Amino acid sequence: MAAGTPIKEVKHTLAGEQQEFVCRLLERSANRAVLLYPITQGRRIADVLIPDNSRTYAYYWTDRPYNVYHWVDEDGRTIAYYINLAAGVTFRQDAVEWNDLAVDLLITPDGAIRILDEADAAAASGDVQTRIAAARAQALADKPALLAEVAASTERLRKIPPEPQAG
């Protein structure tokens, strides 16, 4: 699939729900994909405001227990990094599919970390709890290099303009 073509992000939640989001493929290799999702309507995540006309650069790896949403404003400044603890990331021709482990790490440019949605994972099985703990530990250990990697990649990729999203 060529860069710039529409692709779906398919997320499976611990509650058994499936959510789909139409994005644009920016890059894909054997173990990494980067998708772009324009944010036309602002929203608030915890205490972070993501304004209208921001962008989500979504990074997925098949060999890491997390993915990263890098939110940038229309001038390219980082709003926040949102690390989703994840499992079972697979790349299909028309989609990036992953299992959400519920717990997320929200990291603002000042380095503050907020751990979100732990209550959503409280009823998960012991095996899932173990995966969550291991994924969180790895994400925190990887944090300095991970954020530098994502920031550099976003800076390079942000020159690609978003296309309007349907609906």
Image (spheres, helix red, strand yellow):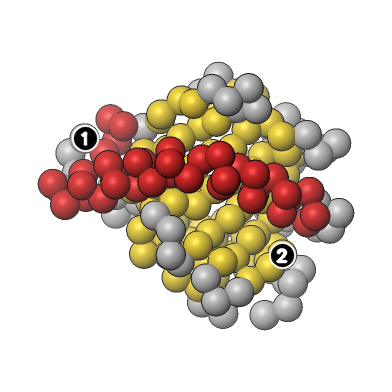
Residue at 56% in and 39% down = 144
Q: Is residue 105 above or below residue 10?
A: above
Q: Secondary structure at mark 1?
A: loop
- Relative to 156, is 63 on the left or the right? left
Which quarter of the picture shows residue 73?
top right
User: In this rendering, does residue 12 appear at all?
Assistant: no
- Where does label 1 land, which residue? 122
The numbered mark at residue 16 is: none
Mark 2 Cα shell of 10 Å, populated few (<14), some (14-19), many (≥20): many
Question: x, y percentage for residue 104?
Answer: 42, 38
- Where does label 2 land, which residue? 26
User: In this rendering, does residue 21 appear at all?
Assistant: yes
What residue type is disc 1 on?
Ala
Q: Earlier in the sequence, mark 1 or mark 2?
A: 2
**CA separation, marks 1 and 2?**
35 Å
Mark 1 Cα shell of 10 Å, populated few (<14), some (14-19), many (≥20): few
Placement of the N terminus among the 4 image quadrants? bottom right
Residue at 64% in and 61% down = 34
What residue type is disc 2 on?
Leu
Q: Is residue 59 above or below residue 139?
A: below
Question: x, y percentage for residue 89?
Answer: 43, 65
- Relative to 80, is 142 on the left or the right? left
